[in-house]
Image (cartoon, rainbow, N blue to C red):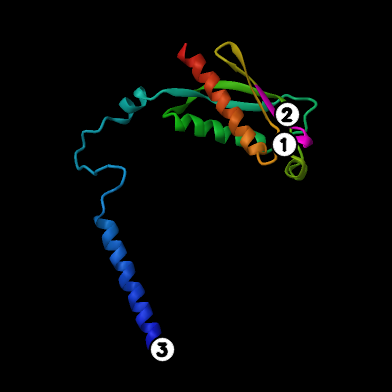
Amino acid sequence: MNSRVILIAASLAFSQLCLVAHAQTPPESGYTQSTETNSPQPAAVEAKVNKMPQLVVKWACDTCEVNEKVIPLLDKSYSNEVTKNGQVIANDEIAEAVIVEFRQRNPANRSLFGVFAGKDILALKIKYKGKELLARDYHANAWQGMNALCESVAQISYQKIAELNAQ
């Protein structure tokens, strides 16, 4: 019984010691807190940030078997790509995308047979600023499925839209 009490007391003392040490350790990122309030106003900050259009995706592939998870995966991956590049999605600008080609291998067949099971394919036609862009990719390996393919196509979409924005 005494050993349990000692163990609990030692655990509590150690956890308090860790909390004190953590509170005194400066952040690793080099960020220091300041009490100054000279930061720019939100409108000034927003003006400096590059904006990207919303990517609105719809199905337009008559021969495709619709997978309801694809559009949310594309939305999330595109949003992540925009954020990763230090930009924000504009609420007043839209890039319309339609899925024109889609094929997804059965996950069990993909895992068992890999390249011999065929390939996952995803292609988007994007209309933005009066131009048509194509974002297409495929995976034929055993370990990457539709999630990775949606990320790849969203990255390609982002790159093509960003190039058009830079012109």
Q: Are marks 2 and 1 in contact (CB under 8 Å)?
A: yes
Task: Identify the residue shown where x is 37% and y is 78%.
Answer: 8
> Of the numbered discs in the image, which one, if any, rests on residue 153?
none
The answer to whether residue 122 is magenta is: yes
How far separated are the C-alphas under marks 1 and 3? 59 Å
- Residue 100 location, x and y as percent? 71, 23
How far separated are the C-alphas under marks 2 and 1? 9 Å
The kind of residue tagged 1 is Asn
User: Circle 1 sits on which residue?
Assistant: 67
Task: Identify the residue shown where x is 21% and y is 37%.
Answer: 37
Q: Provide the residue span drawn in magenta.
A: 115-124
User: Circle 3 sits on which residue?
Assistant: 1
Neighbour class for label 2 at 10 Å: few (<14), some, many (≥20)?
many
Q: Earlier in the sequence, mark 2 or mark 1?
A: 1
- Residue 130 location, x and y as percent? 58, 10
The kind of residue tagged 2 is Phe
Horizontal side of 107 relative to 74 (left or right) equals right
User: Circle 2 sits on which residue?
Assistant: 102
Task: Identify the residue shown where x is 62% and y is 36%.
Answer: 148
Residue 72 visible: no
Q: Secondary structure at mark 2?
A: strand
Q: Are marks 3 and 2 in contact (CB under 8 Å)?
A: no
Task: Identify the residue shown where x is 53% and y is 22%.
Answer: 159
> In the picture, residue 55 is in which quadrant?
top right
